[in-house]
Amino acid sequence: MWKHPRLRERLLRHWTDPRHPYSHRFQEKYREVVEMVLSRPPSDDDALDAELRERDLSLRVVVREIPPVFGSFY
């Protein structure tokens, strides 16, 4: 879904919508890294994890911070 521009924009609108219970956390702390992780190919996972660890994160942590999609406002 992330590779399709229209779906990516829809997800971002949903995740940043004030009605979404995790929108503030996503926008304030994880948006940049979530977008980076979703944009990279799976073949870069090891390098990406090493890069994230330099920022005191990990691939596992960031993947867990991808907000869920739910609610009638999606």
Image: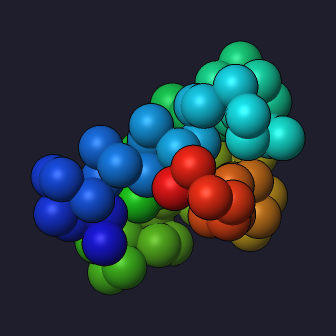
Total numbered labels:
0
Would you say 60 lies left or right of 8 here? Answer: right
Would you say 51 lies left or right of 60 here? Answer: left
Frontmost residue, 47 versus 60: 60
For this orientation, the residue located farthest to the front is 72
On the question of residue 59 being in view, the answer is no
| Quadrant of the rendered image containing residue 59 | bottom right
Q: In the image, what residue occupies the spot 30% across and 43% down? A: 9
Frontmost residue, 26 versus 34: 26
**Colour mapping used in the image:** rainbow
For this orientation, the residue located farthest to the bottom is 43
Q: In the image, what residue occupies the spot 71% across and 18% down? A: 28
Above or below: residue 59 compared with residue 5: below
Quadrant, the N terminus: bottom left
| Quadrant of the rendered image containing residue 23 | top right
For this orientation, the residue located farthest to the left is 5
Q: In the image, what residue occupies the spot 69% across and 60% down? A: 71
Q: Position of residue 51 (x, y in %)?
A: 54, 47
Above or below: residue 6 compared with residue 29: below
Q: In the image, what residue occupies the spot 43% across and 52% down? A: 11
Frontmost residue, 24 versus 60: 24
Q: Position of residue 69 (x, y in %)?
A: 62, 64
Q: Position of residue 41 (x, y in %)?
A: 28, 71
For this orientation, the residue located farthest to the top is 28
On the question of residue 23 being in view, the answer is yes
